[in-house]
Image: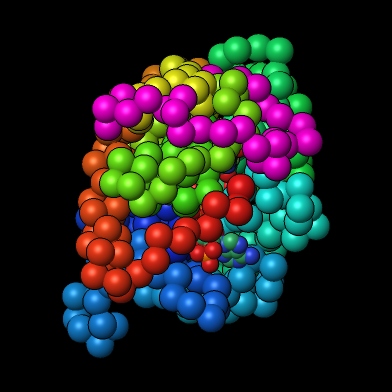
Amino acid sequence: MGKRALITGITGQDGSFLAELLIDKGYEVHGVMRRSSTFTTERIEHLYRDIHEPDARLKLHYGDLTDASSLRRVITLAQPDEVYNLAAQSHVRTSFDQPIYTAETVAIGALNLLEAIRDYRDSTGREIRIYQASSSEMYGNARECPQSESTPFSPRSPYACAKVHAFWQTINYRDAYGLFACNGVLFNHESPRRGETFVSRKITRAATRIKLGLQKTLYLGNLDAKRDWGYAGDYVEAMWLMLQQHDPDDYVVATGQCHSVRDFLNETFAYLDLDWQDHIEVDPRYFRPTEVHELRGDASKARNLLGWKPRLRFRGLVRMMVDHDAKMAEQEKTLVDAGLATTQMSHEWH
Ligand code: NAP
Ligand code: G4F
């Protein structure tokens, strides 16, 4: 029998890459998804087989991190060996608009899951290993750069505060109850599956649309912010590795290189033979009440103990995203030219 894994947030960017990785490794993968009035399974469509087929390795369950009873029911049904808690209201700017919902999902949601796993272990005797998706946002404007496992947290958003809560709860469940619980403190990671309101994808989507005349201007916030951008496909391997170790621990996962939003614009527009300065306007609505200016991670511990290192670097990542979005823009243009779509896309979101 292969192992069974349960992924919360399976419909998100990381959930889809992790599901792919685990299915490749022979796991039966269970995913928690929210009920929605529209389909949210686009990122995992390619993995899905009819559950009546014998080779179906992906099973989806309705649930929500804020609904503890649903988590308990799914754990009982799936009987996982490993749980990856990736679900979150993951947008930092949005967390200022919805701080309580963000805390309920990110902080209390993680606690609901830890409690469900502890009770399941106590009542069945079966061990479940758990991965908690912690974030470099927890460092805020840390005095040290690069940031490592020993850098003190200094959160600067409702999202980051909620992630700090979940981080410490994870450690407390490890220490107090002996759960095999790990935090991955992941720095920004992107891909063609990145949500379109995060700055990387917002830029690659807009630049490729501008190239084809589908859009003229892109409105952005703070162009000076610096991030350590890696590739999501590389980062999910680190998540898996953490749960394969002899002992549970916490690890930073990062490339060690950082670039500004301006650098991201340069790289993207230059690849398309465009000058970003002709197309960008700064709109203060995208500023954050408190900004995190520079994040750069030191992933030495993950490299030394997990044998993990990133394969794709900044330029390759940007080009991969641009190539993908250029195809999307071409498809959109075909529809627009045929009168089957309008060029109206929402620029109103963060
Ligand atoms: P994402 O694309 O925004 O995906 C978030 C997932 O969580 C989606 O599947 C979403 O479902 C689900 N979700 C949201 N609220 C939920 C709730 N109340 N109950 C159940 N599911 C819920 O995020 P991501 O980039 O894959 O990131 C995965 C995790 O890593 C998140 O916890 C994020 O905070 C953390 N993280 C991300 C990065 C990064 O750079 N990507 C870095 C550090 C940490 P819907 O599809 O229904 O919206
Ligand atoms: O792409 P972002 O929204 O990502 P942010 O805030 O760094 O958060 C992401 O990474 C975290 C890890 O450090 C995750 F925990 C979190 O879940 C998420 O995945 O913004 C990056 C930077 C910020 O400094 C922001 O102010 O880009 C700046 N920015 C400038 N203009 C913008 C925009 N960000 C967005 N989303 N939209 C803009 O128009």
The image quadrant that residue 288 belongs to is top right
Applied colour scheme:
rainbow
Residue at image coords 60%, 12%: 145
Residue at image coords 72%, 49%: 95
Q: Is residue 122 visible to us here?
A: no
- Residue 123: x %, y % from top left: 62, 71
In this picture, residue 50 sits left or right of residue 186: left
Rendered position, 330 above or below 293: below
Q: Is residue 48 visible to us here?
A: yes
Q: Nearer the viewer, residue 51 or 273?
A: 273
Q: Nearer the viewer, residue 34 or 302?
A: 34
Residue at image coords 25%, 87%: 52
- Residue 319: x %, y % from top left: 27, 33
Identify the magenta region: 270-297
In this picture, residue 167 sits left or right of residue 243: right
Rendered position, 228 above or below 170: above
Judged from this view, the residue extending furthest toward the bottom is 52
Residue 108: say if magenta.
no
- Residue 279: x %, y % from top left: 46, 33
In this picture, residue 336 sits left or right of residue 300: left
